[in-house]
Structure formats: structure tokens, C-alpha cells
Image (cartoon, rainbow, N blue to C red):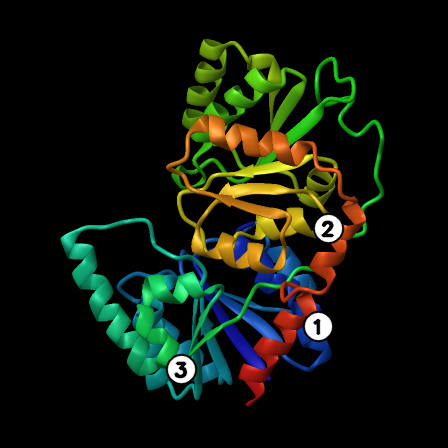
Amino acid sequence: MRVLHIFGAMNRGGAELRTISLMPAMTERKVQFDFCVLSGNQGVMDETITDLGGRIHYIKLSWGFVWQFFLMLRRERYEVVHSHVAFVSGFILLIARLAGIKKRVCHFRNTSDGRSSWLRSMRNGLLRFLIRHNATHILGVCEGALSGFIGESWRESSQCKVIYNGFPAAQIVHQLDFWQELIPNYSGKKVVINVARMDVQKNHLRQLQIFYQVTLLDPHVHMVMVGLENADTKAQLIQYLARVGISDKVSFLGLKSDVMRWLSHADVMLFPSLWEGLPGAVIEAASVGVPVVASDLPGVIEIARQLPVVNALSLKASDKTWAEQLIKQLNRSDEKSARVEQFTVSDFQLSANVEALYAIYSE
């Protein structure tokens, strides 16, 4: 069976990484994943995909796209087209239907596209109509994703289904001196971590405002920020740290490929995002027993139902309230192994994700 996944580009985003992580198990079931990227550009994950046996079609979403995409689908004869590009999936799946693709999957990975205007609402209404009439299956990474893009009526539709992203159980060897070379004058300080690219959605300035309050409650705490950096955003953050006098308490570590090592050595994760689908970093932290304090978004609340190590707070709560919750989590007395055990019996296991998607592809 051959499945074509549609993305903008194959870079290190959550949806891209989660889809690629399925490839070995799907190959064992004789399902091949190929990809079509609408930017027409190569991505940092391309080599990983080809190493795992997948192919990548670079077809830019431009004036010639419809004909090129249609001809490619007719030539390749995929059994499934699985689109991950939010409302644009309606347009993609219409072409797939015209090309004779029998199984057409729309997969919502977020709870919002983060933009609003009268013109965009009109455009989204049309694309939502196309999704409803051209998708054989409409998936969401959480209930909030389907509610945000389709509306509450999804609950009565056999077309719609929640499939949680899956994560492998990580086996990380703990290093006592892990932070020694990274944090100046480190002497066993507790570490607050955030893992996210520097983007408006991830609320980085609010993170530092909350952490400043943490330092007032406990000066022996350090924060590390891991993720793709934006020069303008970073400059604003550095300016804020200098103004409140805690520049020596925050480290910017940039993009890391082995993010689980960093997470597993932290003491708590701070994650006050403005919007998310099913935030992978939150599940990854919980999977290695690291407590999380995150904004009470629908996906976060769904994670917290199964993983009590995740604590949801309103973004309307004060920075001090957030800081107090972080301090509480830093001083937990329960065993880390018990927190990890909660993950191993949750619906966020990689094997559960494989089973759910394979059932849709093969029905």
C-alpha cells in the first residue's frame, strides 16, 4: 500500500516528525509513505525520509500546481492521499478525488491557524466545505483540533475521528554532570526548560516574565531555552533579561536534534503557548517523568487527563501564579519512575498511533 502525505516542507516540525516516526512500523506492515511538499523546497528531514524508503515530490503550490499534482497522482496511483495542511487540504483532496484516489484523509494538527480576518473567514468557509465533501476521513490530533476547524458538529460525524500522536518510550541514561558545561557556575541548580521554536505562538516573552517571578521565589533556579531561534525575537528576550537583571539565569541553547536528552535532565517544563494542537514537547517531557506547567489549551487538557504530571493553567493567571506552580512542581516528592509508568499505559504510545492509522488505511 502506498500513502502520499502532503506537507509544506519536511523540516523539524511536530507533525512532520510524528509522521516520519511511523515509517519503520508501517514498512513492516507493507505500507510505504511518500511525501509531496507544497513549498517546492527541500527540507532538513528529506534525507531521513529517503533513508527509510520514502520518496519526495517537490510540487510548488503555484499556478501550475493543479495540473502537475493531478498528473503525478494519475501516474503514481496512490491508494491514499493524507493531507496535513489545515484548510488547504480541501483543495488538495478535491484534486485527489478528481484523480481517482479512493481514500482521502484530512488531518488537523492544530486548534487554529492563528489568523483571522473577514476575507480569511470566507476563504476558510469554502475550504471547509471542500473538506467535508472530498475527504473520506477527517482526523484531529485532539478533540480541540476538530472543534477548532470543523466545529462541534464533528462529534456526530462518522467522517471524523481523533487519533493522538504517538511517541516511543525513551531510554535515556542520566548524566550527573549534564548541565555542568552549559550553565555558568552550575552547582546542582534546578532547571526549568522550554522546547519550542521562537515564534509568536510559543509566547517566549511571557515565559521569561514568568521565570523572573520564579527567581524571586527561588534564586537558585536556571532556565534553558531549546529550539530554532529567531534573531529579532532573541534580541527582544535578551533586552528583557538585562532590564530585570537575570541574564545570568537563562541560557539559549538553539536547535537540538537529541531533544529528549535535554528534556530528561530538566526538572520542570514551562510551556505557555498561545495555541497548539497536541503539543508533542509536552508529551515528550511527560514520557520521561518531567513535570509540565502549560497553558490550558484543549490539547494540553486532553494530555493531562491521562498524564497527571501535566498541569494546565490559564494564560489569564498572573505570572506569580504560574511561578508558584512551577516551584510546586520543582519540589515534587513522588518518584520519577511512577510518572514514566503513567506514560507507558497511555494512548500516546507510538504503537497506538500506528494501529489507529493502519486501520484507516486498510479498511
Query: Residue at 78% across / 17% down in the picture?
Result: 187
At 30% from the left and 68% from the top, the residue drawn is 151
Seen at 75% across and 38% down, the residue is 333
Q: Are marks 2 and 3 in contact (CB under 8 Å)?
A: no
Check disc 3 and report the residue beneath it: 159
| The N terminus, quarter of image | bottom right
Tell me if I can see residue 154 in this picture: yes
Amino acid of disc 2: Arg
- Mark linked to residue 339: 2
Instruction: Tell whether 50 sits left or right of 74.
Output: right
Q: Nearer the viewer, mark 1 or mark 2?
A: 2
Q: Secondary structure at mark 1?
A: helix
* Image side of residue 136 versus residue 251, left or right: left
Q: Which residue bears the numbered disc 1? A: 25
Of the pair 311 and 34, the residue shown nearer to us = 311
For marks 2 and 3 on the same chain, the one whose residue lies earlier in the sequence: 3
Question: In whole angstroms, how far apart are the C-alphas of marks 1 and 2?
Answer: 26 Å
Residue located farthest toward the left when viewing the structure as drawn: 118
